[in-house]
Each structure stands twice: as structure tokens, then as C-alpha cells.
Amino acid sequence: GDSVTQMEGPVTLSEEAFLTINCTYTATGYPSLFWYVQYPGEGLQLLLKATKADDKGSNKGFEATYRKETTSFHLEKGSVQVSDSAVYFCALSDGSNTGKLIFGQGTTLQVKP
Amino acid sequence: EAQVTQNPRYLITVTGKKLTVTCSQNMNHEYMSWYRQDPGLGLRQIYYSMNVEVTDKGDVPEGYKVSRKEKRNFPLILESPSPNQTSLYFCASRNRDGSPLHFGNGTRLTVT
């Protein structure tokens, strides 16, 4: 079945460092891809999305490009801030009427001043 | 403010004592869903509902029940909780058109 694999965390960076969180997926058909962020004590919030190959999603300085040839959707940010500390989830939607999102295991990011 | 509201935020209970976690959304969304979040496993779907009186199983439905008598509410029922249901639970909703999910703030359940 469909699945999402994220890089193991936690990821610890200094402020202003470059961030990459790897995400690869396995899916039949043409899924939509998402990054969600979970701040401490809160629910998940959509960070960005891409619905077809070569689309680039972007928001709040974060970017991810839908790469069909490598089945990847890596999250990047050029300069992280302490406020970016959170858990990041990569997810895919198969577009079926179940509306189900399939999530990766999550990657914890800690940014130190 | 558009939101998904879950209650309670924290719940500690004992094995076998029935409990209900409530979920309500004020966005008139047709679709609602329950997920559980466990370390190393991400989020897994328990049940979902496409509309009033329409519910279906997700990937991990065993030990759970849901109902959708009204559009705004989607309670999660544990008839006889067990320790393996200790987890962080999230309710989510969205429009039928596939727009992104809106999540509640979660309910942390501990079953002893």
C-alpha cells in the first residue's frame, strides 16, 4: 500500500542554518503531497502542499518540490529560526473519496539560538 | 474563529471504563476523521465520516466506535479501553472538495 518515509530525527540546528528534512513516498497513481507542522501542545497545521509533479509548495520560507522521478518531497528552508522548532510531518493523499492522509513518522526539529 | 474543538485535552482512565472524546467543528465541513499519533508511527486513521450518518473504518478501527448524528459533531467512543489505546488523538475536518485538513489540538489519553 501507499506509504511515506521521513528521515529520522531529532534534527538539531543552530539559528540561521540551512534545513533539509527528507521525505520519500510510495504510491500508486498520482498523489498530492503535504507538509504539516505540529508546534508543542497543538494540532497539526498545513505548512505547504503540491498536487502534481514538479509543483513547488512554499510557505513561511519553507519549500518542497514534488519530484516524481525520485518519489520525493524534501522540505527545505534557507535560514531557520528558534520559532521553527516543531515536529514536521510529510503526508500524501491518494485522492480517493476516503479523504485519508498517509503520514510519515514525523521529524522533530530543534533550533538553538 | 474557524476551528476544530476536542474535549478533553487530557484524560486518564482505567481499563474497561467506557469513555467518549468529543469533537466539534464550526466550518460546516462534510468530512471528519479521527487519527491517533504514536511515537515512530506518525498519525494513523481510526475512522472517518463523509457526511451525516455516513461513517467508515480507517486503518486502525479496532476498539473504537464513532457516530455522526449531526454535521458538526463526531465523537470517538472507547467502549472498553485498554492500555494499548494510550495515545494522542486528533480529530480533523475538511470540505468534501479535498481542501486541506483542519486539526483539533489533540486529546492525550492514558489507560492504566
Image (tube, coloured by chain):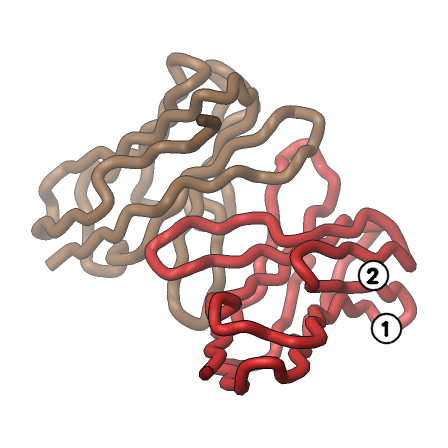
Which shade is chain B?
brown
Q: Residues within 10 Å of mark 1 (few under 14, many from 20)?
A: few
Indicate the position of residue A77 as horizontal and vertical percent values: 69, 72
Indicate the position of residue A110 as horizontal and vertical percent values: 46, 78
Identify which residue is drawn at 21% across, 39% down.
B8
Q: Residues within 10 Å of mark 2 (few under 14, many from 20)?
A: many
The amino acid beneath tag 2 is: Tyr
In the depicted structure, whether residue A17 falls above or below residue B22: below
Q: Nearer the viewer, residue B15 or A53?
A: A53
In the depicted structure, whether residue B27 falls above or below residue B105: above
Q: Is residue B2 left or right of residue B106?
A: right
Label 1 with label 2: CB-CB less than 8 Å: no
Marks 1 & 2 on one chain: yes
Tell me the mark number nearer the camera, choosing from 1 and 2. Answer: 2
Q: Nearer the viewer, residue A14 or A9?
A: A14
Identify which residue is drawn at 30% across, 57% down.
B87
Q: Which residue is mark 2?
A: A66
Q: Is residue B86 left or right of residue A110?
A: left
Which shade is chain A?
red
Q: Which residue is mark 1?
A: A70
Number of on-image labels: 2
Q: CA distance from mark 1 to mark 2?
A: 9 Å
Identify which residue is drawn at 88% across, 64% down.
A68
**Quadrant of the rendering where the C terminus of chain B is positioned:** bottom left
Indicate the position of residue B18 as horizontal and vertical percent values: 14, 37
Indicate the position of residue A69 as horizontal and vertical percent values: 91, 69
Secondary structure state at the residue bearing disc 2: loop
Chain at numbered mark 2:
A
Secondary structure state at the residue bearing disc 1: loop
Q: Nearer the viewer, residue B98 or A113?
A: A113
Q: Quadrant of residue B6?
A: top left
